[in-house]
Image (cartoon, helix red, strand yellow):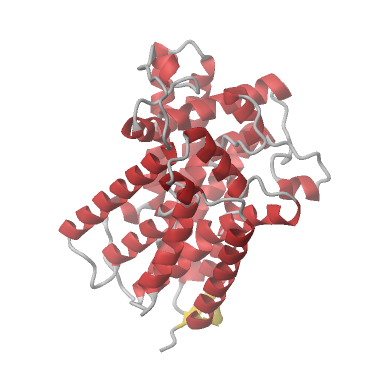
Amino acid sequence: MSFKQVSILSSPNFAFISALMGMYFLVPAILGLFFIDDTYYVKLSLITLVACCFIWVGSKINILDNRFLKNSPRISVSEKYFHWFIWISFLFFVTVTFITAPSIPFVSALQGASLSDLSEERGEFLKGRTGIESLLAYVSTLFTGALVPFSLAKLFLHNKRFRYILLSLFFCYCISFLQKALFLNALLPIAFVLINKEDGINRGKQFLILCGLIFTLYVMTKLASGNHDMEYFGPESMAHYFSAAYIPSNSIDHLLWRGTAVWVFTAVDTLHVIDEQFNGLWLWGATSSFLAAIFQLERIPLEKLVFEYQWSWNDIGNSNSVYITEAYANFGWLGIVTASIFVGQSFRWFSKSQDISFKALWPLYGFALFSSGLIGTLLSNGYVLVFLIGLFVKFRLNK
C-alpha cells in the first residue's frame, strides 16, 4: 500500500535527533553555562552530542534493508488471528488486574480523594503488587507499550468494524489508574495512520486531533492532582525550577514542568547518582533485571536510587531517564556509542518499512527512549517483538 509522506513524521532519525539535541543538549548547556552551578548539566550536553552523532552513524548503515524488499521471504501470519490473540489476552489481563486491585484510582479521584491518597493508590494498582501479582506491572507495560497500539494501528488502517470499541476499552484501562499520558500510546499511532493512509484526513481534522490530545492530557492531569489545599510558590531560581523541590502552581504548570524540567534534571540527577554512589564504575548491565539474571549480577534499581536522590526512598517510586544515562551507567562511553548506533539503525527500519501500522509506532518508541532506558524499551515495552514482526512477518488480510 502506498501512502503519503508527512513532514517530520516521515523522518524518525531526524525528528529524534532534533528532540534530543533540543532537550538534552541545548537546554542543559544553557543552564550549566549561565544559570546553574552544576557541571553535570554540561556533561549531559556532551553525552547527548556524542549520542546524536552515533545515532546518525547507525541510521546510515545498510544491514537489514533487504528485509523490506517486496520479494523478501517472510513468515505469513493471519492478521485476524493476531488481533484475536492480542485482545483476548489483554481482556484477560485487565479482568485479573481489576479483580485483584485494592482500589481504582479513577473512582477515588471522582470521589474527591487527596493528592497523596491518589498517588498511593496509583502505586498500589500495579507497582505495589507482591508475589505473583507483581508480574501484572510487566504485562501491562508489554501490552500498553507496543502490542495493543500496534493492533489498534492496524485496525484503523483497515477500518475494522470494532476498532472504536477496542480503542474505548484501552482508554478505560488507561484512565482507571490515572496514567496521564498512557492513552497517547494508542492515539498517536492511530493519528499517524489516519494522516498517512491514502484516504487520510485534512489539516483541519489533524488540528482537532491535536487539540483533543492536549485537552485529554490536561483533564487527566487535573484528575490525578486530586483535592488539595497546598500553598504554592513560584520558582525562586532556575536551579529551583529544575529540581524536585519545585511545586507546580496548577495543572498547566504541572504539565509544562513535567514535560521540560523534570526530564532534564532527572537525567542530570542520574549522572550524579552514577558518580556519587558507584564512583562512575560500569554496572555491566546490572540496572536490567534480564541482564542481571543472565550475568548473575546483583540487580541495581538505578531508577529507584535516582528517585531516592530526588524525593527520598519510596518502594514504588521510580525516576526514569533518557536512554543515554542507562547506557552510560552500564557501559560508559562505549555503552552510549553502541546503544546509539542501534537506535539509529532501528529508526532506519521504521523508515524503510512499507507497513504504515509498523511505522506508526516510531513516535512511541522514540518517546520511550526519550524518557527511559533502551534495554527496558526493547524487553519490557515489547519492541523486540515489534522489530521481529517488522523484519520477518507478513500479515495476511482476512475478511
Q: Residue at x 26, y 65 (%)?
A: 4
Q: Is residue 162 left or right of residue 48?
A: left
Residue 199 spot, x, y in % from top left: 23, 72
Q: Residue at x 36, y 63 (%)?
A: 190
Residue 83 visible to the viewer:
yes
Q: Nearer the viewer, residue 187 or 194?
A: 187
Residue 98 position (above or below residue 308): below
Number of marks in the rendered image = 0
Q: Nearer the viewer, residue 199 or 244?
A: 244
> In which image quadrant can residue 297 be found?
top right
Q: Which quadrant, please, contains the C terminus?
A: bottom left
Q: Residue at x 68, y 49 (%)?
A: 129
Question: Residue lying furthest bottom in this view?
Answer: 399
> In which image quadrant can residue 135 be found?
bottom right
Question: Residue lying furthest right in this view?
Answer: 296
Q: Residue at x 57, y 55 (%)?
A: 141
Q: Nearer the viewer, residue 371 or 255?
A: 255
Residue 330 spot, x, y in % from top left: 68, 36
Q: Which quadrant, please, contains the N terminus?
A: bottom left
Q: Is residue 278 left or right of residue 97?
A: right
Residue 158 spot, x, y in % from top left: 35, 77
> In which image quadrant can residue 259 be found?
top left
Residue 292 spot, x, y in % from top left: 77, 45
Residue 147 position (above or below residue 213): below
